[in-house]
Amino acid sequence: MTRFIPDKIFFKIGEVAEIAEVEQHVLRYWEEEFDILKPSKNKSGQRLYQRKDVDLVLEIKRLLYEEMYTIAGAKKKLKESKKSVGQLEFSFDREQAVKFKNSLKSDLQSLLKVLKD
């Protein structure tokens, strides 16, 4: 089930608990158990979760509550899924890049000419 996550940069632990529908102490426990769940903390020590952390919390909850994994099983599954992501492939069109470079170079030369005059 997909949950609505507000468009914010940082979330406090109470907000994440509400989004994930778990208690705050559960999130603190998961932080201890799952090495990859490490929200940053502000100067006063308050946890600040980023969007990626919230997504991870929801994935942990799904694995534990819906898929019925144990903590150890969920750790292993997350580790495996992290490995399977691998490196992204990007296509590169050399001819198009050269054309863009030449066009950019021409534009910059024209701009220099205008600035000198």
Image (cartoon, grey):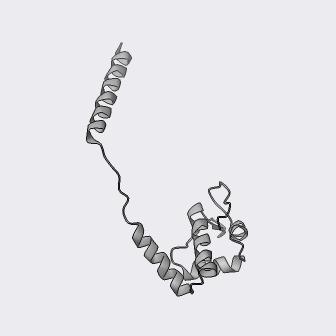
- Image quadrant where one finds the N terminus: bottom right
Q: Where's the C terminus, which quadrant? A: top left
Q: Quadrant of residue 16?
A: bottom right
Give the side of residue 86 with respect to residue 44, left or right: left
In this view of the protein, which residue sits in the foreground, 108 or 23?
23
Q: Position of residue 36 (x, y in %)?
A: 51, 74
Quadrant in which residue 11 is drawn = bottom right
Residue at left 69%, top 80%? 25
Residue found 37% across the figure and 21% down from its top: 111
Q: Position of residue 38 (x, y in %)?
A: 55, 72
Find residue 30 and report its horizontal and vertical position in percent: 60, 79
Q: Residue at x 66, y 69 (%)?
A: 46
Q: Is residue 47 left or right of residue 93?
A: right
Q: Which is more toward the observer, 116 or 75?
A: 75
Compared with residue 105, is residue 69 higher up or lower down, i.e. above or below? below
x, y percentage for residue 19? 70, 67
Count of all numbered marks drawn on residues in the image: 0
Query: Residue extending furthest top?
Result: 117
Toward the viewer: 4 or 110?
4
Q: Is residue 16 above or below residue 73?
A: above
Rendered residue at 35%/56% (across/down): 89
Q: Quadrant of residue 63?
A: bottom right
Q: Compared with residue 112, is residue 68 higher up or lower down, i.e. above or below?
A: below
